[in-house]
């Protein structure tokens, strides 16, 4: 059920504390068993999840509420990195983590944007974005590199599901960008980092979170940080 599949390892607003190895192994084994049980219920004999099966899985883990069509497409894109049209077990792990963060773990993004857009210009500059990320994810020490990565993911979310009716910062696209960024950091730095090596999940290994590598992919995407989350007239394709 939702709430048990991907709980955050931060419970006090601080950076995660180091767990003992036995506890880490136990929790990784529990996570592996949960994912395997879901695969057994929904995947076919090929052990792969297609779009229809993914819809069923997301509905199940979200208490019977089916995903919106745009959210289903986003989940498939997040997991299906090789663009095969299917999710393997390791890819499904990523999708379920990010979907839970997107649907359950974040505060109201509209209110959060209003709070941190201090000058009301419908954009978030670097400092405003840092403070928003820290509050949204319950962390401290968000860096300029983190902001640029979230900016990149925000632009990608806008391109995949543009909503011309939104004036200013699209809260849905920003929520998805933050979910991806936070999940990547948790997987790389948190107590489930062992899953990254493919030791527990079959299928493609998950990439380690490397801020500098991610920044190298941005290229000339941004002319300035002040435009990272701007209005649709200037920033959308």
Image: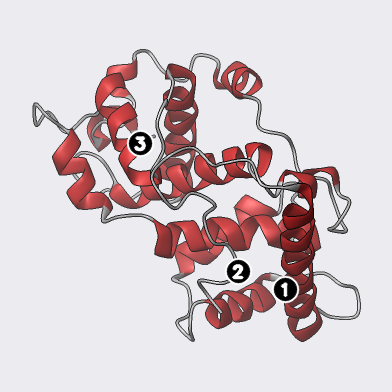
Residue 54: name its quadrant: bottom right
CA distance for labels 2 and 1: 7 Å
Q: Is residue 231 visible?
A: yes
Residue 108 drawn at (x, y percent): 26, 56
Q: Is residue 165 above or below residue 5?
A: above
Question: Which residue is pictured at 70% across the width and 50% down the height?
Answer: 192
Residue 144 drawn at (x, y percent): 42, 18
**Element at label 3:** helix
Rendered image: mark on residue 83: none
Q: Is residue 125 visible?
A: no
Residue 104: name its quadrant: bottom left
**Element at label 1:** helix
Disc 3 target residue: 134
- The tag earlier along the polypeptide, 2 or 1, is 2
CA distance for labels 2 and 3: 23 Å
Disc 1 target residue: 34
Q: Are marks 2 and 1 in contact (CB under 8 Å)?
A: yes
CA distance for labels 3 and 1: 30 Å
How many other residues sit within 10 Å of disc 1, few (<14), some (14-19) or many (≥20)? some
In the picture, measured across the screen, residue 176 lies left or right of residue 61, that is: left
How many other residues sit within 10 Å of disc 3, few (<14), some (14-19) or many (≥20)? some
| Residue farthest along the left direction in this orientation | 119
Q: Is residue 219 above or below residue 196?
A: above
Name the one closer to the observer, 112 or 57: 112
């Amino acid at each position: 059920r939702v709430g048990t599949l991907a709980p955050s390892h931060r419970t006090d607003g601080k950076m995660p504390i180091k767990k003992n190895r036995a506890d880490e192994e136990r929790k990784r084994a529990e996570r592996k068993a949960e994912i395997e049980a879901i695969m057994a219920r929904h995947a076919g004999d090929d052990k792969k999840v297609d779009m229809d099966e993914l819809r069923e899985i997301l509905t199940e883990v979200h208490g019977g509420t089916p995903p919106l069509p745009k959210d289903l497409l986003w989940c498939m894109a997040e997991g299906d990195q090789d663009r095969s049209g299917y999710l393997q077990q390791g890819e499904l792990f990523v999708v379920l983590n990010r979907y839970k963060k997107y649907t359950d773990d974040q505060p109201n993004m509209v209110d959060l944007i209003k709070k941190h857009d201090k000058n009301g210009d419908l954009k978030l500059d670097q400092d405003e974005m840092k403070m928003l990320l820290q509050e949204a994810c319950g962390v401290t020490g968000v860096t300029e590199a983190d902001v640029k990565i979230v900016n990149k993911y925000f632009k990608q979310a806008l391109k995949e599901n543009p909503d011309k009716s939104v004036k200013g910062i699209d809260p849905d696209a920003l929520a998805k960008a933050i979910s991806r960024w936070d999940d990547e950091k948790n997987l790389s730095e948190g107590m489930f980092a062992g899953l990254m090596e493919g030791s527990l999940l079959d299928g493609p290994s998950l990439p380690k979170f490397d801020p500098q590598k991610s920044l190298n992919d941005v290229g000339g995407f941004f002319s300035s940080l002040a435009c990272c989350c701007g209005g649709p007239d200037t920033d959308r394709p």
